[in-house]
Image: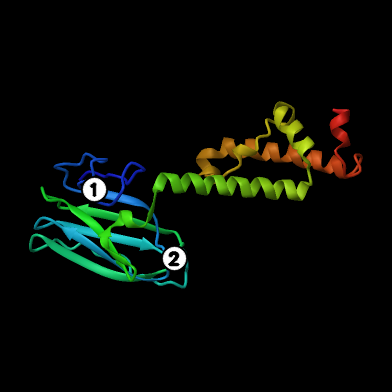
């Protein structure tokens, strides 16, 4: 089975999408995030073109109170061709929903996923907003990194002049780099122990500076002039 991940080049969830070049493959996997325009019920349709084909569709909700049956469409081999399996779920407009679609047992007629809403006619997923998994992951990491950097600067009360000096002369502060802050659980795994030690060393250098700033420097950036 070919594992094909939905990418930016793809415009919908369809095994026939030329972005994947999966002609003749027994299966394909699509993964990403979707947004619907308004609150309400939406029905997902898995169209299977060949006997024996199946589609497993899993939708993860960002809201713990929104209980979704998963998979919303189970992977059951089609007994007739063509065939269609569908299920509706209640979705919130503008919310991000992580989805995975696994097509299996594909034949020459392939398979695709469609969607329909109260104000949305039955059609391809390209009718709604789709985000590739890679793009969403990159955005999330960037957001976490920015949040951590802002939190550190808020606590230490460093100003622009100090940040510019520390970053431009990072070698003097244990190679301090805000861009190296961990953004995923794997960044703190045993396999990345050396990275963790390096990050802690950078933190200590920053903490030492912040301590001096609050003491001898009188909570100002006066130390930069001394340096």
Decide if residue 210 is on the left or right side of residue 120: right
Residue 218 position within the rendered picture, expressed as x and y whole percent measured from the top left: 91, 43
Q: Secondary structure at mark 2?
A: loop
Dot 2 alpha-carbon crowd within 10 angstroms: few under 14, some 14 to 19, many 20 or more: few
What label sits on residue 28 in the rendered view? 1
* For the residues bearing labels 1 and 2, Cβ distance under 8 angstroms: no
Residue 69 position within the rendered picture, expressed as x and y whole percent measured from the top left: 33, 70
Q: Which residue is mark 2?
A: 93
Q: Earlier in the sequence, mark 1 or mark 2?
A: 1
Decide if residue 13 is on the left or right side of residue 192: left
Q: Residue at x 46, y 62 (%)?
A: 95
Q: Residue at x 55, y 44 (%)?
A: 142
Dot 1 alpha-carbon crowd within 10 angstroms: few under 14, some 14 to 19, many 20 or more: many
Residue 172 position within the rendered picture, expressed as x and y whole percent measured from the top left: 74, 27
Visible in this render: residue 97?
Answer: yes
**Coloration of the structure image:** rainbow
Task: Report the number of discs.
Answer: 2
**Quarter of the image with the C terminus in it:** top right
On the image, which quarter does residue 66 sit in?
bottom left
Decide if residue 17 is on the left or right side of residue 40: left
Give the alpha-carbon distance from disc 1 to disc 2, as whole Å.
28 Å
What label sits on residue 47 in the rendered view? none
Visible in this render: residue 184?
Answer: no
**Quarter of the image with the N terminus in it:** top left
Q: Residue at x 76, y 31 (%)?
A: 165
Decide if residue 221 is on the left or right side of residue 134: right
116 up-or-down from 206: above or below: below
Please state which of residues 174 and 114 is positioned toward the viewer in this rendering: 114
Residue 18 position within the rendered picture, expressed as x and y whole percent measured from the top left: 23, 41
Q: Secondary structure at mark 1?
A: strand
Please state which of residues 147 and 181 is positioned toward the viewer in this rendering: 147
């Amino acid at each position: 089975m070919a594992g094909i991940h939905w990418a930016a080049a793809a415009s919908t969830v369809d095994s026939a999408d030329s972005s994947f070049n999966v002609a003749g493959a027994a299966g394909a996997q699509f993964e990403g995030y979707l947004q619907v325009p308004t609150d309400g019920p939406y029905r997902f349709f898995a169209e299977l073109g060949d006997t024996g084909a199946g589609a497993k569709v899993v939708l993860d909700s960002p809201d713990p109170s929104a209980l979704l049956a998963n998979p919303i469409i189970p992977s059951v081999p089609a007994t007739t061709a063509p065939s269609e399996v569908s299920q509706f779920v209640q979705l919130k407009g503008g919310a991000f929903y992580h989805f995975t679609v696994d097509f299996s047992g594909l034949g020459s007629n392939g398979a695709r996923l469609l969607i329909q809403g109260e104000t949305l006619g039955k059609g391809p997923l390209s009718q709604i907003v789709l985000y590739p998994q890679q793009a969403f992951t990159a955005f999330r990491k960037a957001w976490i990194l920015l949040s951590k950097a802002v939190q550190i600067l808020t606590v230490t009360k460093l100003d622009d002049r100090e940040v510019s000096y520390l970053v431009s002369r990072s070698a003097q502060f244990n190679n301090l780099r805000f861009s190296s802050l961990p953004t995923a659980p794997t960044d703190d795994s045993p396999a990345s122990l050396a990275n963790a030690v390096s990050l802690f060393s950078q933190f200590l250098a920053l903490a030492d500076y912040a301590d001096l700033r609050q003491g001898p420097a009188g909570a100002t950036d006066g130390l930069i002039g001394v340096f």
